[in-house]
Image (tube, rainbow, N blue to C red):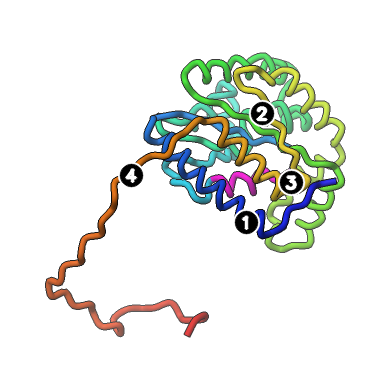
Amino acid sequence: MAGKISKKLYESELKRLQFELVKMHEWVRQEGLRAVVVFEGRDAAGKGGTIKRIAEPLNPRVVRIAALPAPTEREKTQWYFQRYVAHLPAAGEMVLFDRSWYNRAGVEKVMGFCTDEEYREFLRSAPEFERMLVRSGIKVIKYWFSVSDAEQERRFRSRLSDPTKRWKFSPMDLESRSRWADYSRAKDAMFAATDIKQAPWWVVESDNKKIARLNCISHLLTQIPYQEVEHPEIVLPDIPSDGYVRPPISDQTFVPPVYGD
């Protein structure tokens, strides 16, 4: 049974944590740090909502989201990790991967989009790839959002009845329902091969989305030691009066005032 949290407490804690995220991302920028945060989990597990709340108050030039589409025919001929490497952070950047190279260990394996040899090679290569990133100075943080089958079912049905969420439902979601056990076995094999000391998997219980968001953000803040960056005081200069006169309102085309007075 998922825990509960009041709306008031959730909103106050989210605001507090987002304030800390701003401090952290300012430290990342100032110190030239590099960080990768991987978000994986079952469909409708709440990854997207958590990513949105993390990125919401931050400078997109410092913290950006990488949500790659299906590979093109050309990308399919590349080294598997190649298209992900292009999105890795430079100094002073953090990248949030909304799904990642672990597609191969999950959906590609279960749906037969890769060969058995490609899958086995991925399980061998992924830990070395991540160790290489860590040795190069990139902090790698991996989250797995765990949702029960009953809660996933409820969220799927909610998507079907809500026009604003209908776009989230894909044919792949339908197929995943009939392959629940296959996805579970694939996840277990993935953890066994890639839960390494340099970049461990952190499991986020996500039957309650709000609690999952707070827990994930709170934990993320512990993974990158940071200090508050001091900013010089900003003094707004006066606007000089140099005789400028705005053009007549009648010369401009305005959006019709559907709302407001």
Looking at the image, is mark 2 or mark 3 earlier in the sequence? 3
- Whether 259 is drawn above or below 103: the answer is below
* Amino acid on which disc 4 is placed: His
At 59% from the left and 32% from the top, the residue drawn is 73
Residue at numbered disc 1: 11
Q: Which mark is residue 102?
A: 2
* Amino acid on which disc 1 is placed: Glu
Q: Which is in the foreground here, disc 1 or disc 3?
A: 1
Residue at numbered disc 4: 231
Looking at the image, is mark 1 or mark 3 earlier in the sequence? 1
- Extreme residue in the left direction: 242
Looking at the image, is mark 1 or mark 4 earlier in the sequence? 1
At 63% from the left and 45% from the top, the residue drawn is 50
Q: Position of residue 244 (x, y in %)?
A: 16, 74
247 displayed left or right of 175:
left
The residues tagged by marks 2 and 4 sit, at their Cα atoms, a distance apart of 39 Å
Looking at the rendered structure, the secondary structure element under dot 1 is helix
